[in-house]
Amino acid sequence: MGMKHLLLEVYCDYEVYCDYKEEKKEKPIFCFYNIDNPGLHCFENSCKYFSYTIAPNELSYSDERGAIDIDGIHSVALGGDMLPEGISDETFTKYKDLWGKICIEKIDEAYKKYMLTIGLSPL
C-alpha cells in the first residue's frame, strides 16, 4: 500500500459559486461544520464547492482530525513576513533551502527529545 501525507490549503467556494450563479443553494447535507469551514467531509463527498491548492514550504502541526488551525501557532509558511521584499529568485532559493534545513533539524531534535523523555530509544 502506498501512503503519503499531503499538506494542502483547502477552500470552500460556496459563496463565490452562488454569487456567480446569482442564486443561493442549500448547504450540502454533509457540511457539518457550516459553510466556509472545509475539511475531510468535502473530500469524502466530492463537494462541488470544494477547491484546494498546494501549501509549499509550510510546517504545521495537525489536530486529531488532521486539521490545522491557521492561527500563527500551529502553522508557519515561508513567505509573507519571512521574506524581505524584492529578493531575487536565487536569494529566494537560498532562503527556501535554509528554511527546509532548519525545519528538518528541528523536527529531528523534537523527535529525539520526545523519545528520550518517554524512555524510548530514537532511531
Image: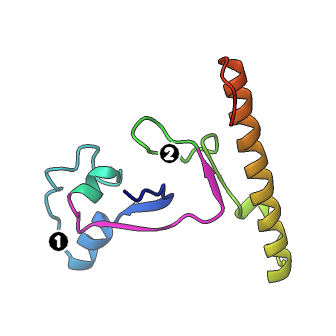
Give, as a three-letter code, the residue at label 2.
Ile
Where does label 1 land, which residue?
Answer: 23
Q: Quarter-wise, where is residue 67 in the image? A: top left
Say which residue appears at 66% left-offset and 62% top-offset. 57
What is the x, y in percent for residue 55? 56, 63
Left or right of residue 105, residue 16 in this image: left
User: Is 123 included in the stretch rendered in magenta?
Assistant: no
Give, as a three-letter code, the residue at label 1.
Glu
Say which residue appears at 86% left-offset and 76% top-offset. 91
Task: State the residue in front, 18 or 78.
Answer: 78
What is the x, y in percent for residue 19? 27, 73
What is the x, y in percent for residue 108? 73, 42
Q: Is residue 27 above or below residue 18?
A: above
At mark 2, the secondary structure is loop
Task: State the residue in front, 43 or 115.
Answer: 115
Q: Give me the disc on residue 66.
A: none
Say which residue appears at 35% left-offset and 51% top-offset. 39
Mark 1 or mark 2, which has the lower sequence index? 1
Where does label 2 land, which residue?
Answer: 68
At mark 1, the secondary structure is loop
Nearer the observer: mark 1 or 2; the answer is: 2
